[in-house]
Image (cartoon, rainbow, N blue to C red):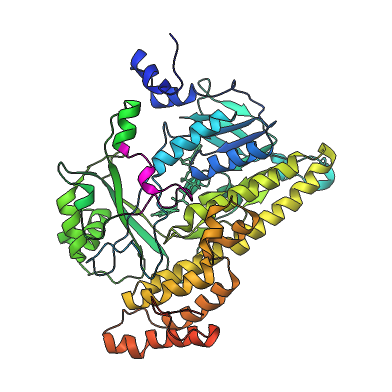
Amino acid sequence: MTIEQLHRFTQLRATDPKLTDSMLLNSNNPSKFSTKPDVVVAGAGIIGLCYAIHLKNIAPQLNIAVYEKNRAPDGLQFYCIDREGVEVTSEDIGGLDLSFQLDRRMSELFLTVWAQSIGINVYHGVEAEFQIAEKYQVSESQEDTHCVKTPQVKLKNFPKPGGTDVNAKLVCDASGFSRKLTSKFGKKELFEGWNCDAYWAYFKEKEGGKAESRSDHWDYPATKHAQSGVPAHEIPSTKALSEKFGCPFEFITSIGWAVRDNHKLPDNLDEYGSGEGERKFNYFKRRYPTLNKLMNGVYELLPRYYGKQTYFVRKSMAYRNPIVAGDGWFAIGNSAGFTNPLISPGINAGIGTAVLAANLSKEILDQSPEQSRAVMQKCAATYQSYSHEFMIPRLHQMNRYWYNSFRDHRLFEIMVPCFWTLGIDDANSHYVNEFTKEDIYWVVGAGQDQFVNFSGKVLDILEASNELPANDDEIEKGNMKESQEVVALEFGVHHARSGDTIT
Ligand SMILES: Cc1cc2nc3c(=O)[nH]c(=O)nc-3n(C[C@H](O)[C@H](O)[C@H](O)COP(=O)(O)OP(=O)(O)OC[C@H]3O[C@@H](n4cnc5c(N)ncnc54)[C@H](O)[C@@H]3O)c2cc1C
């Protein structure tokens, strides 16, 4: 039977309903499994796939294999609601479109198929382990000092029971929070001061709960960033795509809160549920009336949707790893470090690590074996300094800036245009072009020196107290006024309010 490319997965499943998701996806791989690919990537999240695709594009001759332990793309989707819980404020505030949202499951599926179409093998349902060879511990004088000493990869139960050793020239840890390789090079470093904890669960929309009538201001502009020149209304709806490809669909979404860990909670949370996750999830939900109404009216909780738990907790989310590159390896995306990516620079920043690591990988693999180790060390130092010294600390500062701005909507309205002017700058030139070297160091504005200086001064004022502003008077006379003065002092901005001119 001829399988049409367009309906390949649908038809394969029709011919054999027992085919699992990973069997279907893996059947799309362009070449045979090899125990000696040039490059191995552990993790087919967005960042691992971006790295593989970018590297293949700039070095098409390379044999690249990506291993993903999940059986199929998986993902979370996040919405943001204001402090009082009255409005969904993700639309335009001070001219800023806050939505950079991507549906991760769709993005990962799309990137998987794209990677396969350009010659990369992506295997789902395959867990990778790294083994750092003993030769790492051997002194230089005893060992060959020229060759790159790449960590070895062991694939668990693939392709045969008992697993397989894979020897690549270069490996990339894109395993996210699992930190499969980076964890072998030291404990994660937490930042001083407060951190963020997250509480979430999985939901589906109730029958009759229409997306467009969910709440005021819920016209979520998520597709605006898809591509310059492609109006959102021309992008097919999920329903249209479902009909075209014969795929039934339902909206399952995770909804959660990412909160400062120094937030003062009531002493007794028993009334909110049984475990910590349920109690804290419900506490924050009920605290905000619109959120509570929206959740109760539209979303149905899916108990134990992922395994045994219903409610999930992740604590102290912001961290960086002490070592993120070394002999024969790079760590990219969340496996290198993470800050809670408010206003969404997470994926963008992660892509910065993927593109830089891919460019450096090409440089290393282009060398003769005699030169490769020296070049590897130079490239590892460049990458280490980018991720550990530059990107993650700057994202962390931006994150603190946002959390403090969220303490009052009037502060937020001041901070957004300041950020837009000093950090984002000319958004169009950043978003319409390809991802460039400048973008790697831009980090959605967090990389701009002007913004770093400005936000540092704002934080000196706002972090002096953790209390929410008590009343209007305090805001006018206290934090807000001083923040405006900082702006005025530093940049000659006299009215950094939304709508006013900023020079
Ligand atoms: C609460 C929260 C909210 C966020 N909101 C946003 C947002 O609004 N916008 C935004 O841009 N970003 C957001 N992010 C960040 C975004 O999710 C990350 O930037 C992005 O997912 C990182 O991608 P990654 O590929 O590094 O890691 P992941 O997406 O975690 O992918 C890692 C992959 O590796 C796989 N893996 C793990 N161990 C192994 C192994 N041993 N072998 C093989 N595979 C393995 C995992 O199964 C996973 O698929 C948010 C993150 C969190 C936690």
Frontmost residue, 335 versus 4: 4
Q: Is residue 164 left or right of residue 277?
A: right
Q: Quadrant location of residue 448? A: bottom right
User: Is residue 230 a member of the stretch shown in magenta?
Assistant: yes
- In the image, what residue occupies the spot 48% across and 68% down? 398
Q: In this view, does 105 lie above or below 337?
A: above
- Using the image, determine if residue 222 lies above or below residue 291: above
Q: Give left or right: position of 482 versus 360.
A: left
Residue at screen point 45% across, 26% down:
25
The answer to whether residue 176 of the structure is visible from this angle is yes
Residue 418 in percent (x, y) is at 47, 75
Within the image, what quadrant is residue 250 found in? top left
Q: Main secondary structure of the magenta part?
A: loop
Q: Does the magenta stretch include residue 221?
A: yes
Split into 4 quadrants, where in the image is the N terminus? top left
| View extreme (top): residue | 1
From the viewer's side, name the closer residue of 5 and 158: 5
Residue 75: x %, y % from top left: 39, 43
Q: Which residue is drawn at 44% across and 15% down?
A: 3
Residue 177, how many percent across, how many down? 47, 49
In the rendering, at what x and y percent does residue 440 appear?
Answer: 60, 56
Could you tell me if residue 273 is visible in this image?
no
On screen, residue 76 versus residue 210, left or right, reads right
Please report the bounds of the magenta region as a residue range: 220-238
| Vertical position of residue 235 compared to residue 347: above or below | above
Count the numbered circles shown: 0
